[in-house]
């Protein structure tokens, strides 16, 4: 197992109280595989990954649990060791390529910096490596363009450059935090295809954080659905789309807009995501859940495996029969719309 | 890059004309008793009329301005060994009414004093503002941050005259550490005092006084800029690359956070060269501010005009320099 996260908790102390941004999240990523993490804004997806990378501000942050990377707990690693790992073993791509590259350094210089931070090589060698990667991510005329500055690149090109920078040291794990959200649709597809093909070439494992279920369906091997700082459901990708077992996942799948369906209004999950300062009692989804019953309001459902497939985890009090029925209904409705 | 330079220079020239025209109009159209000044207190009507005519003050204002600019900018060929080498503007700013000295001579002797004060002051305030501003940004709400914010509040609220008098009293009069008046030439030991050591010794209190207000303003600005830059996505990217904090700060945070400081510095130097009136007055430094202040008291308008022209020139030149410097350090400006 490349990365094993166990009962990860990240709390932020604010003036209003403790914000439980990540509250007991566990998952694992295998070598060369892709994990998709989905959820609404503020569900703790990004904070989970920033915590693993040790990139949260230290001040007023309380972290507990374990994040074992090749057996080494990243949460207790010293800052020097974390710096060695960051950018070398675990690399990260961020949401907004417009602001994630430094405007006053050329693209090439930023890649060279990434190489030289981890490899004791002369600048010329680092530059050659940078050029190789820029070519690999499909920057046209990369040799000339590597001395350009970020503002001379389009959004898609910048994200390609970010990917090149992340892969320049051959990381074992690539964390992509909403890598396509800031891009237009055609560019999104290009970037996702690029990441997939690079994964085959480089053999990196990938964590894709997204709120786009389409991205998950296309790229992920496993999916983690997060709601209000906790895991609602975790399953291999086909299973999640074919037999979702959590009402929140149903809501997400049901609210996917479809070009071919003739609807007046977009379907949405009613209500707002809860405050992480004072999360609801019991199941955190209960105030918005159409299937809610008494137990949901008081007892927090544990994340447990489904009887016929222990790799499919979900946290919901509903009985499996009902869930199977509702999942089948949802699937049938989607199929009907599609045909 | 070349086109950018040309454009900036052309703008600077236009700006120079506009600013001098406006000041000219303001200074020469305000009611004043120039005639008696030039012709003397006991002069009669006819003598005054002659004086007015002699000065060209009976002509329309645009003619006066035209003449003024012509005298200032009339090309003068500079010869080296009998061969014309290049052309310079004549730079004639006219004569002082009161002292019958060419204004340009007065300005040439006063400008180095002001320049010493301003450039020394810039170094002092940067030496204070850079470390304090950066450290406060890195440790917001810390003891250092709170202390520096108190300093900022005092520095901005207290008037330079008051600060200057306090410094002169405490460090000069009471403790006797520094001289409290007069200027010593940097190069030329013409009188009993001169040379770099005496120069710096005499300038220390003026520098400190002049720098306090700017140091306070710059601490606040640098702190805000650095704090903002620390939250930028590209700083997170740098950390995610595994860059050590010192490198993150130097190469990513400060490179961006200090860009606006360069602009401010250019403007403040330009403005300062127009005369740091308060500081020069307190420490009795014969700089441009003092020159202008005395000229205003004596309604010696050519001198006032001369200082204004010089200040305008300095401000424009420094803004131009900063524009060019900025284009060099900020790639986004360079190519757009």
Image: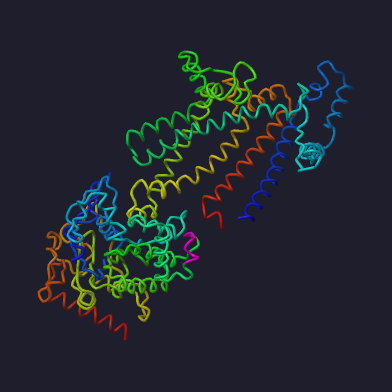
B285 left or right of A222?
right
Residue found 36% across the figure and 74% down from its top: A193
What x and y, as percent, mark residue B161?
54, 23
B272 left or right of A123?
right
Residue closest to the eye, A78 or A277: A78
Task: Report which quarter residue A69 is drawn in.
Answer: bottom left
Q: How is the image coloured?
A: rainbow
Residue closest to the eye, B62 or B2: B2
What x and y, as percent, mark residue A149?
48, 59
Considering the image in quadrants, where does the C terminus of chain A appear?
A: bottom left
Please determine whether, in this image, residue B29 is positioned above or below residue A229.
above
The total of numbered circles placed on residues is: 0
Considering the image in quadrants, where does the N terminus of chain A appear?
A: bottom left
What x and y, as percent, mark residue A4?
18, 62
Give yes or no for residue A109 being in the magenta stretch: no
Task: Report which quarter residue A110 is drawn in.
Answer: bottom left
Q: Which span is picked out in magenta? A: A143-150
Please determine whether, in this image, residue B243 is positioned above or below residue B222.
below
Residue found 45% across the figure and 48% down from its top: B255
Please determine whether, in this image, residue A78 is positioned above or below residue B34.
below
Residue found 68% across the figure and 26% down from its top: B109
Point out the residue furthest to the right here. Answer: B46
B290 left or right of B303?
left
Give yes or no for residue A146 being in the magenta stretch: yes
Point out the residue furthest to the left here. Answer: A307
Please determine whether, in this image, residue A254 is positioned above or below residue A11.
below
Residue closest to the eye, B30 or B167: B167
What x and y, as percent, mark residue B229?
41, 48
């Amino acid at each position: 197992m490349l990365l094993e996260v166990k009962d990860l908790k990240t709390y932020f102390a604010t003036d209003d109280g403790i914000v439980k941004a990540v509250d007991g999240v566990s998952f694992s990523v295998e070598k060369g595989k892709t994990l998709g993490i989905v959820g609404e804004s503020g569900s703790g997806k990004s904070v989970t990954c920033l915590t693993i990378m040790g990139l949260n501000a230290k001040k007023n942050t309380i972290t507990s649990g374990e994040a074992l990377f090749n057996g080494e707990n990243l949460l207790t690693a010293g800052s020097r060791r974390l710096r060695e790992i960051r950018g070398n073993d675990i690399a990260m791509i961020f949401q907004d390529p417009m602001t994630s590259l430094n405007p006053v350094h050329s693209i090439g210089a930023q890649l060279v910096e990434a190489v030289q931070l981890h490899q004791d090589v002369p600048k010329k060698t680092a530059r050659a490596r940078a050029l190789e990667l820029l070519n690999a991510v499909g920057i046209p005329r990369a040799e000339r363009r590597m001395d350009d500055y970020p503002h001379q690149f389009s959004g898609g090109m910048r994200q390609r450059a970010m990917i090149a920078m992340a892969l320049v040291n051959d990381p074992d794990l690539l964390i992509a935090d909403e890598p396509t959200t800031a891009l237009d649709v055609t560019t999104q597809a290009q970037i996702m295809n690029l990441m997939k093909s690079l994964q085959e070439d480089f053999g990196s494992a990938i964590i894709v954080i997204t709120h786009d279920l389409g991205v998950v369906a296309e790229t992920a091997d496993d999916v983690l659905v997060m709601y209000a700082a906790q895991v609602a459901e975790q399953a291999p990708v086909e299973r999640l789309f074919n037999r979702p077992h959590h009402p929140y996942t149903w809501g997400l799948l049901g609210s996917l807009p479809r070009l071919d369906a003739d609807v007046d209004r977009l379907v949405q999950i009613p209500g707002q995501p809860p405050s992480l300062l004072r999360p609801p009692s019991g199941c955190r989804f209960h105030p918005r859940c159409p299937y809610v019953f008494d137990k949901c309001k008081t007892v927090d459902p544990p994340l447990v495996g489904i009887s016929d497939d222990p790799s499919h985890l979900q946290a919901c009090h509903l009985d499996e029969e009902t869930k199977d029925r509702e999942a089948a209904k949802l699937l049938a409705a989607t199929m009907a719309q599609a045909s | 890059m070349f086109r950018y330079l040309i454009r900036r220079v052309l703008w600077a020239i236009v700006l120079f004309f506009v600013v001098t025209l406006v000041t000219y109009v303001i200074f020469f159209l305000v009611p004043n008793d120039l005639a008696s000044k030039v012709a003397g207190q006991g002069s009669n009507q006819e003598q005054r009329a002659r004086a007015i005519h002699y000065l060209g003050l009976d002509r329309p204002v645009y003619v006066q301005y035209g003449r003024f600019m012509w005298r200032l900018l009339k090309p003068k060929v500079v010869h080296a060994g009998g061969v014309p080498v290049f052309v310079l503007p004549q730079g004639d700013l006219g004569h002082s009414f009161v002292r019958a000295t060419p204004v340009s001579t007065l300005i040439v002797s006063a400008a180095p004093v002001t320049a010493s004060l301003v450039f020394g002051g810039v170094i002092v305030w940067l030496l204070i503002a850079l470390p304090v501003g950066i450290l406060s940004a890195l440790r917001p709400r810390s003891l250092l941050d709170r202390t520096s914010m108190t300093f900022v509040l005092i520095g901005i609220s207290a008037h330079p005259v008051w600060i200057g008098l306090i410094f002169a009293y405490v460090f000069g009069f009471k403790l006797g550490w520094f001289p409290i008046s007069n200027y010593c030439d940097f190069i030329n030991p013409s009188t009993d005092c001169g040379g770099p050591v005496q120069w710096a010794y005499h300038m220390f209190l003026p520098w400190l006084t002049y720098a306090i207000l700017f140091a306070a303003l710059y601490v606040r600005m640098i702190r805000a800029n650095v704090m903002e830059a620390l939250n930028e996505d590209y700083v997170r990217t740098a950390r995610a690359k595994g860059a050590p904090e010192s490198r993150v700060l130097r190469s990513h945070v400060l490179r961006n956070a200090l860009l606006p400081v360069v602009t401010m510095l250019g403007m403040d130097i330009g403005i300062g060269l127009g005369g740091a009136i308060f500081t020069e007055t307190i420490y009795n430094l014969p700089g441009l501010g003092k020159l202008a202040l005395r000229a205003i008291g004596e309604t010696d308008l050519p001198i006032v005009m001369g200082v204004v022209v010089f200040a305008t020139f300095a401000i424009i030149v420094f803004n131009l320099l900063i524009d060019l410097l900025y284009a060099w350090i900020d790639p986004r400006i360079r190519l757009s």
